[in-house]
Image (cartoon, rainbow, N blue to C red):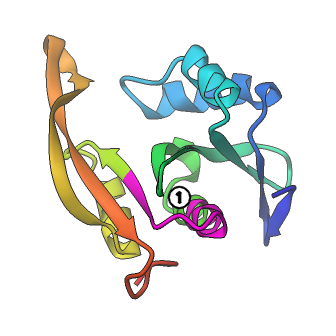
Amino acid sequence: MSGVLMTDRYLSQMTESDLDEVVVIEKNAYEFPWSRGNFEDSLRNGYYGICMRHVTGTLIGYCVLMPVVDEMHLLNLCVAPAAQGAGAGLALLREGVRMSRAQGLEGLLLEVRPSNHRAIRLYEQFGFVTVGRRKNYYPARHHTREDAMVMRLTFAEEGADGAR
């Protein structure tokens, strides 16, 4: 995937040189962001990082995916707050599915905070279904923890390559 052009934005493989910008977006978008080290470790371990940039070169969003046996695990998908609601998250998700299918994997798995209604709506519209819950998975305010909803998209299902 070298520079896949999509109207006014393009996708490219995440590299070490993208991480300064990635970390800025991560900190602006999340109360409990990944560290630069998390991203460095992901790239070093061979996980897939995808960056989405506006044709001007501005980073809009990114995602990190990890192949696990017969499916892909979406570890992080983030769109810059100023760019949210314009289809970037959907485009990143579609690319993750495309990459997973190209490798012959059976599906895509992810965790999401139950409080992240916008992300849940995107995943459900895309065809993901809730398959479980991980107790106390995420850090939360006041030194507490928040569960994670585990969602899966199985590629054999109808509509598994785009929003319904």
Q: Position of residue 29 (x, y in %)?
A: 47, 34
Q: Which residues are magenta?
A: 94-109
Q: Residue at x 16, y 23 (%)?
A: 145
What is the residue that sits farthest to the front in this orientation? 69
Q: Residue at x 86, y 50 (%)?
A: 56
Q: In the displayed structure, does residue 56 sit left or right of residue 29?
A: right
Could you tell me how many numbered marks the image carries?
1
Q: Position of residue 73 (x, y in %)?
A: 45, 48
Determine the image quadrant of residue 43. top right
Relative to 143, residue 68 above or below:
below
Q: Position of residue 143 (x, y in %)?
A: 16, 11
Which secondary structure, mark 1? helix
Q: Residue at x 60, y 65 (%)?
A: 91
Q: In the displayed structure, does residue 56 sit left or right of residue 160?
A: right
Q: In the displayed structure, does residue 156 sit left or right of residue 66?
A: left
Q: Nearer the viewer, residue 140 or 75?
A: 75
Q: Residue at x 19, y 19 (%)?
A: 141
Visible residue check, residue 125: yes
Q: Is residue 10 magenta?
A: no
Q: Nearer the viewer, residue 29 or 106?
A: 106
Q: Position of residue 147 (x, y in %)?
A: 16, 36
Relative to 159, residue 56 above or below:
above
Visible residue check, residue 117: no
Q: Nearer the viewer, residue 34 or 70?
A: 70
Question: Dot 1 surroundings within 10 Å: few (below 14), some, or many (20 or more)?
Answer: many
Quadrant including the C terminus:
bottom left
What is the residue that sits farthest to the bottom in this orientation? 158
Q: Is residue 102 magenta?
A: yes
Residue corresponding to mark 1: 89
